[in-house]
Structures are given as C-alpha cells and as structure tokens.
Amino acid sequence: MQRKWPKTMLISGVTSAVLIYQMATATEAPSQGLAVLQYFLLACALIGLMGAIAMLAAGK
C-alpha cells in the first residue's frame, strides 16, 4: 500500500496551498462560519499531509 501515500501527499499539499492562497488574497472578510470552515479544512489538509509523510517515511 505504499503507492497511496505520494498521492495523498500531493492532494493534501495542493489543497493546503489553495486554501492558504484563497485566505491570503481575499478582498473582503468572510463570514464567521465560512472562516471557521476554511480553517478546519486547512487543519485537516495539513494533518493529512503530515500523516502521509510520516507513513511514507515509516515505509507502511
């Protein structure tokens, strides 16, 4: 199952980059609910990226 970790890293990395770009270049402040959702999705993407890197490094 080692083939799925590079794909997971790629998807998580792209998702994190897009979310960070969108939040950094927003022209107006989002509503509180949307901001919470964006930060939650960013946290999940970063946790997935770190987990995939750890699993790839462990060779699992």
Image (cartoon, grey):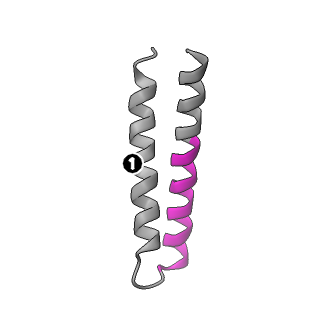
Q: Which residues are magenta?
A: 30-47
Question: In which quadrant of the rendered view does residue 13 lie?
Answer: top left
**Residue at the front extreme?**
57
Residue sitting nearer the eye, 31 or 53: 53
Q: Secondary structure at mark 1?
A: helix
Q: Residue 23, image x and y in percent?
A: 46, 70
Q: Quadrant of the N terminus?
A: top left
Residue 1, compared with residue 19, is above or below; it is: above
| In the displayed structure image, the side of residue 33 where residue 18 appears, left or right | left
For the point 55% across and 47% down, the residue is 46
Number of marks = 1
Residue pushed farthest bottom? 28
> Percent position (x, y) of residue 44?
55, 48
Number of other residues with Cα within 10 Å of mark 1, as a class: few under 14, some 14 to 19, many 20 or more: some
**Amino acid on which disc 1 is placed:** Val
Quadrant where the C terminus sits is top right
Q: Main secondary structure of the magenta part?
A: helix
The residue drawn where x is 53% and y is 23% is 56
Q: Residue at x 40, y 18 (%)?
A: 3
Is 56 on the left-hand or right-hand side of 17? right
Q: Position of residue 34 (x, y in %)?
A: 48, 71
Q: Please, is residue 13 above or below residue 39 in the view? A: above
Please tell me which residue is depicted at 58% across the width and 38% down the height of the picture: 50
Give above or below for 12 relative to 54: below
The location of residue 52, given as percent across then percent down, is 53, 31
42 inside magenta stretch: yes
Q: Determine whether 60 is above or below 29 in the image.
A: above
Q: Which residue is mark 1?
A: 14
Direction from residue 34 to residue 18 in the image, left or right: left
